[in-house]
Amino acid sequence: MAAIYTDLGERVVIVTGGAGGIGEAITRAFLAQGCRVGFLDIDAGRGERLQTELGEKSRFVACDLTDIPALKVAIQSVRDAFGPIDVLINNAAHDERHPTLDVTEAYWDGRIAVNLKHQFFAAQAVLPDMQATGKGAIVNLGSTSWVIGQGGMAAYTASKSAVIGLTRSLARDFGEFGVRVNAVAPGWIMTERQLALWVTPETEKDLYERQCLKRRLVPDDIARVVVFMASDEAGAITNQHYVVDGGWT
């Protein structure tokens, strides 16, 4: 049974990329805490199906997070439904592989937009709520890909390393208002997408040789850490980069 943090009950949470994979696990985990959860995702069909399943304490908003005005409208719709935002989970990302010599300027800008830019503007949109209440938590999802020196997707790894700088800057600027900002860096998490596109018996064997833990890491492994970081149990933790990778790095 997952831990229950009573302080989280009825808090208003936004999860970006919250309709599938790690994001869906995070959405479900906060609802299990009694939170009111707005989740944003570009996959309207999947999001609407999840909304139907999860019920009235959840609110799905279809949104292309690379469209910053649309992102702001989506956040406002959650605010209109549930009230000021207490917790922001910047989860959405896309780890598309790309050979370096094939990358165009437009492709590079698109990768930065889908993996980094929206994290800043989502935080910008909710920070006034947190300043007003004197309390709040932002968790930015990073990655261990840049830590291990993974190749084949330079724009992705550059974006994910930049999440650390963004996290530390926001933590420093808004700590005086009681806002905590941390990053959580997943290792190789076995989502449906990863299993369909990248995981083979050979890659999995290599992974277990590198991980201290000899098992698959799953979305709930990340969700449990993210919920803890948003709770008052982590009330003295900010400006940190927490790795959840089974001991790979």
Image: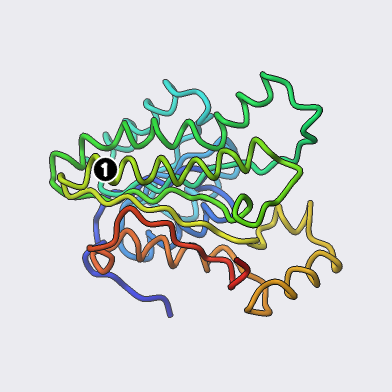
Callout 1 amino acid = Ile
Q: In the rendering, at what x and y percent does residue 101 appear?
A: 81, 29
Q: Residue at x 70, y 71 (%)?
A: 210
Label 1 Cα crowd, 10 Å radius (few <14 / some 14-19 / many 20+):
many
Q: Residue at x 68, y 38 (%)?
A: 154
| Residue nearest the observer in this picture, 214 or 9 | 214
Q: How is the image coloured?
A: rainbow
Residue under pointer 1: 85
Q: Residue at x 59, y 56 (%)?
A: 144
| Residue nearest the observer in this picture, 115 or 159 | 159
For the N terminus, give its image quadrant: bottom left
Q: Is residue 3 left or right of residue 222?
A: left
Q: In the rendering, at what x and y percent does residue 73 appear?
A: 37, 26
The quadrant in which residue 29 appears is bottom left
Q: Is residue 212 left or right of residue 230?
A: right
| Residue nearest the observer in this picture, 16 or 151 | 151
Q: Is residue 85 left or right of residue 245?
A: left
